[in-house]
């Protein structure tokens, strides 16, 4: 188990910058999720931790020691790939014992550890099969066993759930989390799925275009996003972002003017408010329902008002309103987040309300 | 509606497949049939047939009560068979398979450009016209001190000049065909190595495997079928090839393989003696070997993907 | 590592520093060894080609000027080795660029200094002289049989171009039809093609000669063109089928729902996707036709037509076997088109996958 640090790491592919000066620390035993859209550099970061890609500049530290030049085979890192990357010519057992071939472990001991780990991920009945005889979920468990069998310093998961169907994904999420707790291994999960990141990780690192947008606990990222990108990427349905112009008299959004609490600097701002925090038929502005989408447990509405197009959630499984209905929409100041419209960063200590 | 669809189907067949069919039948299927007939005639220089006979095969085998199968091979053919076997075995095992594999493994382990450079060098013999390539060999192994090989041996290593053509004729044809054969193995295997998913290499490295272990556990299993394919196909190619042997060695008895025998007895420029029926008989033996190879090839082919049904039904 | 250091570190803590050092050294040794190995095995391949070029530019009055070759090698080898060494030691592209420029500069300067005065174009006079044999041996000897090199050149060009065009056209059409159309007998045809792939025309030289003789095409240029068209044809059909198999069905289906017929969909949508395959088999086909020797000699009875291969063979064997400079110059001239084509289009050749083998 190890403490892992990235210090001012950059990675260029020719002239293109894949990773632009990121620094990050992972505590021993921590479960961190790197979250971002495709092409944001999250897999590149993972492969640099594994020793497969070399950073262009900056340092990677394991327990404080620089490991930039240490080969992947010596880093004692376990990886689970999106494609699972099981060796097609080997049985499940051979796949799992493969990492132990390169350690000074007797064949019998290797097999014993493999069986133990197989039991842990519940594939002990499949050990003689070949990868092409397994379902996606089973392959995924084999890949996990292979990554864990050598008791890695660091476990790296590269979109491990994206090839599974929805039910299986749900159970594997809990499964992986349970294993990680049990083994206490420092883990980095790379994903573009914010629900996966929120439910599994102790800490989320939100990346965009090769930079870290924000890192913190799932709650912090959800309730206090630091940038417009983090605000819009995390949360489903996404946060409403109302573009406006701040002045002494409040914030002018469309044809409406919002009251402010605190000193909002004059200029362009964005007012963020999550769909579940919009109040219906209390104090507020007149709006017309455009779309009503039942999501099962709740209903998502899209409405048009003087504020522009807004989404809000209602906790009823049968829609209360239908298209064309008139409602009043409002929100409380404590639920709003204001962003500087030019730099897209959060403004501290200021709120807005209708 | 129905009729027009049938008509279109027929015209599509004629346009797309017709020309291929015509060429393949006229210049591969018909010649095979012709060979089957001519092998049992007495056709010679005049290209006329006087009688149907099995005498061509009597030039190849002789009835003998002493031997196990009831017949034995005649001297010249026995010699040709032995030389063919030696030539095919050594060229194939040393160059087409082993050295092709070594080139593929080493060039793919280097950065792309550098690897491509070395592959390009090794494809040179294949890309140069055969007469030029043969000429280079003749000059390199020239028995006088002008030959490049002798210059190296004498000046660099202080050895005596050698006469390769006279003293090591089989080495010459193995090397000259091998330099070309290795490049074909190299090309096929390089593209097979490239098609191994990159993640498999990453996984093996993270699992602690070194370069040799990766070759053993990740690369070699993926090369099983391509290697069999090369072995089977190149066996045949070497079996029937005579161009380089003829151009370098001429009609020398020391390198008279089966294909060379058939060629020199019939069509070789200025020395071919026009014994067409005899050549056809040897060709027939090669055709039979070819059929066996075809069956092996059958087993190596992924019939499921080869025969996968098209997904658009209209024509 | 001393005993004390070992004690100072917890048992399960790896020594990252020495691991990193080892990795760096190993990587350098491995790459160096690979380059040295490949260079050594490549020298026997490259040297004869280099030699023939050197001879063609340096040989005078028939003799072989070997000193020039070794001088040239003496200049080039250290330059290449020096560059290779810097390439291994310095990773930065800029440093490597500088090293390459320096090496190239030294090579050019060295060559100009040492062998520059020995080089001449005299051996290439065959390009401008229509009557080479008379020039060499006096008017009476050759009987006017031997052609100008350009006659052979254009014959070779015609043979290579015509056979390549026909073969590529046929293989593309057939490959597409076999990949995309359902018809009765499709699997029979594919399996027969697999068997035919085995029967190289080399094997069938004699019966092919008889067929050509019977249809009366002996001693015409169309005979080798027809036979060359069939060489490798099953193989090319499989290559093209492979390329068409890789084109997604969706785009063809969408072309058809957009109103195209299947032939239009083939021409406008599918064919452009298989461009790489067409270029690759064209290069292979052309190089094949350009070098052809066996069938051009087997399918003529006298000297009814000349192509480059028979021209060179004749130059080397019969007419001027002792004039090494001239023979080398003809060889270089003959090689040039193949090599240029290969050099510029080689990336298409390495993309080829080979027909239907299990993966």
Image (cartoon, grey):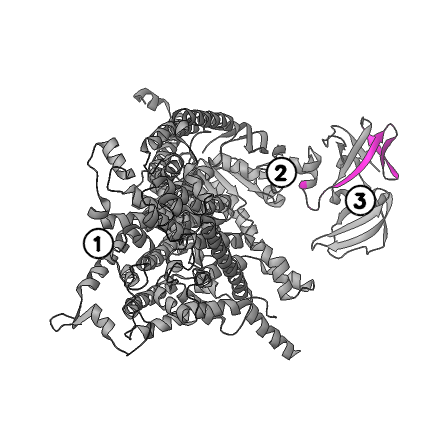
Q: Earlier in the sequence, mark 2 or mark 3?
A: 2
Image coordinates for residue A336, horizontal then vertical, percent: 76, 36
Query: Residue under mark 1: which chain is it in?
Result: B
Q: CA distance from mark 1 to mark 3?
A: 99 Å
Tags 2 and 1 on a common chain: no
Image quadrant holding the N terminus of chain B, namely bottom right
Image quadrant holding the C terminus of chain B, namely bottom right
Q: Is residue B169 left or right of residue B237?
A: left
Q: CA distance from mark 2 to mark 3?
A: 24 Å
Nearer the observer, A29 or C117: C117
Q: What range is drawn magenta here?
A: A233-262
Q: Are marks 2 and 3 in contact (CB under 8 Å)?
A: no
Residue at 64% from the left image edge and 77% from the top image edge: B4
Query: Residue under mark 2: which chain is it in?
Result: A
- What is the magenta segment's predominant secondary structure? strand
Q: Which residue is mark 3?
A: A279
Outermost front residue: C140
Mark 2 or 3: in front is 2
Outermost left residue: B66
Q: Which residue is mark 1?
A: B254
Q: Which residue is mark 2?
A: A218
**Secondary structure found at label 3:** strand
């Amino acid at each position: 188990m190890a403490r892992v640090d990235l210090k001012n790491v950059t990675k260029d592919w020719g002239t293109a910058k894949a990773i632009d000066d990121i620094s990050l620390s992972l505590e021993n035993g921590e479960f961190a999720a790197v979250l971002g859209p495709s092409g944001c550099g999250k897999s590149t970061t993972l492969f640099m931790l594994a020793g497969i890609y070399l950073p262009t500049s900056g340092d990677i530290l394991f327990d404080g020691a620089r490991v930039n030049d240490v080969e992947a085979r010596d880093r004692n890192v376990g990886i689970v790939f999106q494609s699972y990357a099981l060796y097609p010519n080997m049985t499940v057992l051979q796949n799992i014992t493969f990492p132990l071939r390169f350690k000074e472990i007797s064949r019998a001991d290797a097999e014993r550890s493999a069986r133990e780990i197989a039991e842990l991920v519940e594939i002990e009945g499949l050990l003689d099969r070949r990868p092409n005889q397994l379902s996606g979920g089973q392959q995924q468990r084999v890949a996990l066993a292979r990554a864990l069998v050598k008791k890695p310093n660091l476990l790296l998961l590269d979109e491990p759930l994206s090839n599974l169907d929805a039910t299986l994904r749900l159970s594997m999420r809990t499964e992986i989390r349970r294993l990680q707790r049990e083994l206490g291994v420092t883990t980095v999960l790379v994903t573009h799925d914010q629900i996966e990141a929120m439910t599994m990780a102790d800490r989320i690192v939100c990346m965009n275009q090769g930079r870290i947008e924000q890192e913190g606990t799932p709650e912090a990222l959800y309730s206090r996003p630091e940038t417009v990108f983090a605000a819009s990427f995390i949360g489903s349905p996404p946060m409403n972002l109302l573009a406006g112009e701040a002045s002494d008299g409040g914030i002018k959004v469309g044809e409406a003017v919002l009251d402010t609490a605190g000193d909002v600097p004059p200029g362009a701002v964005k007012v963020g408010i999550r769909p579940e925090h919009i109040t219906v038929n209390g104090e507020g502005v007149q709006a017309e329902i455009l779309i009503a989408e039942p999501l099962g447990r709740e209903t998502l509405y899209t409405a048009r008002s003087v504020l522009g197009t807004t989404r809000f959630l209602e906790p009823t499984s049968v829609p209360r309103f239908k298209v064309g209905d008139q409602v009043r929409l409002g929100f409380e100041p404590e639920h709003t987040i204001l962003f500087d419209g030019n730099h897209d960063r959060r403004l501290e200590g200021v709120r807005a309300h209708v | 509606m129905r009729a027009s669809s049938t008509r279109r189907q027929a015209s599509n067949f004629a346009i797309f497949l017709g020309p291929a069919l015509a060429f393949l039948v006229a210049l591969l299927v018909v010649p095979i049939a012709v060979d089957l007939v001519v092998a049992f005639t007495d056709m010679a220089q005049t290209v006329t047939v006087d009688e149907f006979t099995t005498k061509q095969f009597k030039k190849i085998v002789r009835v003998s009560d002493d031997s196990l199968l009831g017949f034995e091979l005649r001297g010249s053919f026995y010699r040709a068979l032995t030389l063919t076997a030696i030539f095919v075995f050594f060229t194939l095992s040393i160059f087409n398979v082993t050295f092709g594999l070594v080139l593929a493994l080493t060039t793919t382990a280097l950065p792309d450009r550098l690897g491509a450079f070395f592959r390009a060098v090794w494809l040179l013999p294949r890309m140069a016209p055969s007469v030029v390539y043969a000429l280079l060999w003749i000059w390199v192994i020239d028995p006088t001190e002008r030959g490049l090989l002798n210059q190296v041996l004498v000046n660099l290593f202080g050895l005596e000049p050698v006469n390769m053509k006279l003293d090591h004729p089989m080495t010459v044809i193995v090397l000259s065909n091998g330099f070309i054969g290795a490049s074909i193995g190299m090309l096929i295997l390089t593209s097979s190595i490239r098609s191994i998913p990159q993640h498999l290499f990453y996984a093996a490295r993270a699992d602690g495997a070194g370069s040799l272990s990766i070759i053993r556990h990740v690369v070699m299993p993926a090369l099983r079928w391509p290697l069999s394919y090369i072995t089977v196909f190149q066996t045949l190619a070497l079996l029937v090839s005579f161009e380089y042997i003829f151009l370098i060695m001429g009609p020398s008895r020391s390198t008279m393989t089966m294909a060379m025998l058939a060629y020199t007895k019939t069509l070789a420029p200025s020395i071919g003696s026009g014994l067409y029926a005899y050549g056809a008989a040897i060709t027939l033996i090669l055709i039979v070997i070819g059929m066996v190879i075809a069956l092996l090839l059958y087993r190596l082919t992924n019939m499921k993907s080869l025969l996968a049904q098209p997904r658009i039904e209209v024509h | 590592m001393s005993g004390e250091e070992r004690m100072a570190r917890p048992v399960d803590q790896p020594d990252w520093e020495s691991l990193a050092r080892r990795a760096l050294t190993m990587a350098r040794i491995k790459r160096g060894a690979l380059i040295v190995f490949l260079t050594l095995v490549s020298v026997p391949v490259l040297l004869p080609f280099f030699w023939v070029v050197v001879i063609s530019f340096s040989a005078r009055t028939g003799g072989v000027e070997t000193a020039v070759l070794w001088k040239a090698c003496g200049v080039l080898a250290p330059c290449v080795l020096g560059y290779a060494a810097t390439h291994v030691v310095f990773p930065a592209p800029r440093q490597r660029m500088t090293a390459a420029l320096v090496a190239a500069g030294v090579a050019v300067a060295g060559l100009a200094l040492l062998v520059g005065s020995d080089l001449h174009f005299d051996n290439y006079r065959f390009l401008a002289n229509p009557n080479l044999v008379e020039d060499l041996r006096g008017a009476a000897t050759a009987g006017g049989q031997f052609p100008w090199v350009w006659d052979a050149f254009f014959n070779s060009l015609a043979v290579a171009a015509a056979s390549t065009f026909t073969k590529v056209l046929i293989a593309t059409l057939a490959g597409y039809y076999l990949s995309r159309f359902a018809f009765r007998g499709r699997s029979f045809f594919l399996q027969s093609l697999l068997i035919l792939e085995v029967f190289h025309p080399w094997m069938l030289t004699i019966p092919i000669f008889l067929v050509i003789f019977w249809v009366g095409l002996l001693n015409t240029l169309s005979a080798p063109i027809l036979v060359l068209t069939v060489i490798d044809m099953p193989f090319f059909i499989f290559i093209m089928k492979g390329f068409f198999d890789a084109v997604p069905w969706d785009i063809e289906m969408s072309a058809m729902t957009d109103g195209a017929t299947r032939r239009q969909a083939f021409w406008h949508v599918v064919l452009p996707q298989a461009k790489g395959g067409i270029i690759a088999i064209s290069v292979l086909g052309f190089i094949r036709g350009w070098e052809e020797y066996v069938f051009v000699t087997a399918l003529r009875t006298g000297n009814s037509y000349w192509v480059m291969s028979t021209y060179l063979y004749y130059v080397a064997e019969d007419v001027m076997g002792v004039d090494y400079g001239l023979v080398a110059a003809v060889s270089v001239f003959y090689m040039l088109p193949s090599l240029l084509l290969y050099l510029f289009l080689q990336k298409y050749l390495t993309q080829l996958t080979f027909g239907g083998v299990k993966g």
